[in-house]
Amino acid sequence: GGPLPSVPALMAPLPSGSLYYMLDDFNHNHEHAVIAGDDGVRYSSTHRVAREGQGTWQYIRDKIKNLQSTATIFDWSVGKVDDPSLSPKKRKQKLVSRLRMQEALLSEIEFEWLRQWFVQGQKHAKLHPYWHDPIKFLIKSFCELEQTTVQIIRLLEKASGRGVTDSDSEDLCE
């Protein structure tokens, strides 16, 4: 479906060589992809590559590295912020803020980068070998962040008194 339960997904088959324009802020608020069959050459542009900042490879890479560089002050195995100068309330706020940033980054990597890459298929990947290393970096980073999320979920389950065993969860990135 679409971004809201009441908005269905839209597919618009167009003849070869067609041009489309998305009105208003549709491109900003809705995911879209142009997919061509295996019988011809595929040309597509969303004009995002012309922008500097958000939506570029450098932007997402730097955002990931920035989040990873702050990971040392968080001990997810025990669920605390390693900063004794902060009050317990400030530590909790910092922990929650960090978790929100991490989950937003996971969504951005998955929906803005990985799904967009893999939906294009093997032929597209072969045509763009310069993207192979960046995509590998994104996958590795995604899996590391997912592992942190799993640790947090286990910590929260333990704190709730429910507990969790290794057989209760699956490793998503293996």
Image (spheres, grey):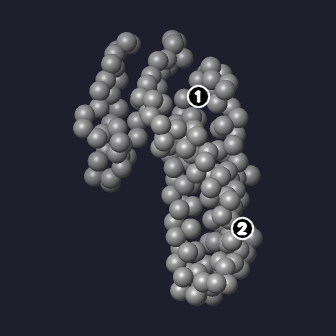
Residue 5 is drawn in which quadrant? bottom left
* First along the sequence among labels 1 and 2: 2
Q: Residue at x 56, y 54 (%)?
A: 106
The location of residue 19, given as percent across then percent down, is 33, 19
Please, what secondary structure does the residue beneath circle 2 have? helix
Alpha-carbon distance for marks 1 and 2? 37 Å
Q: Which residue sits furthest left?
A: 24
Image: 101 above or below 94: above
Residue 138 is drawn in which quadrant? top right
Q: Residues within 10 Å of mark 2 (few under 14, many from 20)?
A: few
Image: 128 above or below 22: above
Q: Residue at x 25, y 34 (%)?
A: 23
The location of residue 10, given as percent across then percent down, is 33, 36
Q: Disc 2 marks which amino acid?
A: Thr
The foreground one among 52 and 148 is 52
Q: Disc 1 marks which amino acid?
A: Gly
Residue matched to label 2? 72
The foreground one among 1 and 19 is 19
Residue 44 visible in image = yes
Residue 79 visible in image = no
Q: Which mark is residue 77?
A: none
- The answer to whether 148 appears left or right of 1 in the picture is right
Q: Residue at x 54, y 34 (%)?
A: 119
Residue matched to label 1? 121
- Viewer-nearest of labels 1 and 2? 2
Residue 20 is drawn in which quadrant? top left
Q: Residue at x 54, y 82 (%)?
A: 90
